[in-house]
Image (cartoon, grey):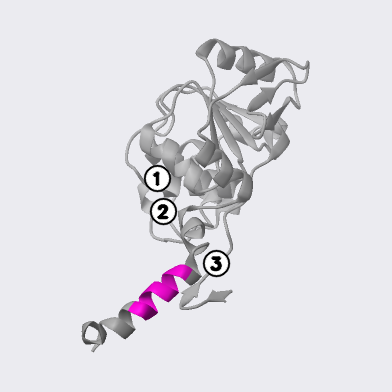
Amino acid sequence: MHCGTFLIEDNMKSFTTINALVAPLDRANVDTDAIIPKQFLKSIKRTGFGVNCFDEWRYLDHGEPGMDNSKRPLNPEFSLNLPRYQGAQVLLTRKNFGCGSSREHAPWALDDYGFRAVIAPSFADIFFNNCYKNGLLPIVLPEEVVEKLFHEVAANEGYRLNIDLNAQTVTTPSGESFAFDITEHRKHCLLNGLDEIALTLRHAEDISDFEQKRRDSQPWLFA
């Protein structure tokens, strides 16, 4: 909708509580080029990248923009291609996830694939920050906890985790709960589906008033 001279677009998806299937990606130091290879970075839209998420591991051929991905041969050994992990919304992975270049397309691709949260012992800083800006929840848990979760996922088909952002907890099917940290500002934004643009546009009327007053008092600047 319009507010003054501003166009307000839909906010990013909010995150409150999910009970979701978990998919394991048992690799450390997964970089952003592995998450979404460079040849697909030709759009600034946030959608359409899911079919090429982890493209080089997911398919047996080389991917290029415009290909019919439904006809490409899948890698049967890649975990996310296994039937038991289809529809997963939680990605479980290893340390330093999201390292490499700072492309915001990486969280876009993960979100478009269907993931709402990523659990790892650590994340690359820029990727970590980009996740919050795009409604994807990055959860840091101790390595021993992540290792325990990997074992439980492997041993139990259909393994699901309950993630409660308000309580800041990850809870297993057995009821064991693990706490995670998040700043109050980031938590507020995710709970309410507010990215940085949406936060700014909450003050759109004040900004418009300021601009009009400046035009009235200093018209020569706008001649």
> Mark 3 near mark 2, Cβ–Cβ under 8 Å?
no
Q: Which residue is mark 2?
A: 40
Q: Which residue is mark 1?
A: 37
Quarter-of-image position of residue 44:
bottom left
Q: CA distance from mark 1 to mark 2?
A: 6 Å
> Mark 1 near mark 2, Cβ–Cβ under 8 Å?
yes
Query: In which quadrant is the N terminus drawn?
Result: bottom right
Number of callouts? 3
Q: Residues within 10 Å of mark 2 (few under 14, many from 20)?
A: some
Q: Nearer the viewer, mark 3 or mark 2?
A: 3
Q: CA distance from mark 1 to mark 3?
A: 28 Å
Residue 33, position as x, y percentages in the image: 38, 40
Q: Is residue 152 above or below residue 61?
A: above
Q: Is residue 175 left or right of residue 47?
A: right
Q: Which residue is mark 3?
A: 9
Residue type of the residue flagged with mark 1: Pro
Query: In which quadrant is the C terminus drawn?
Result: bottom left
Front-most of residues 62 and 107: 107
Quarter-of-image position of residue 115:
top right
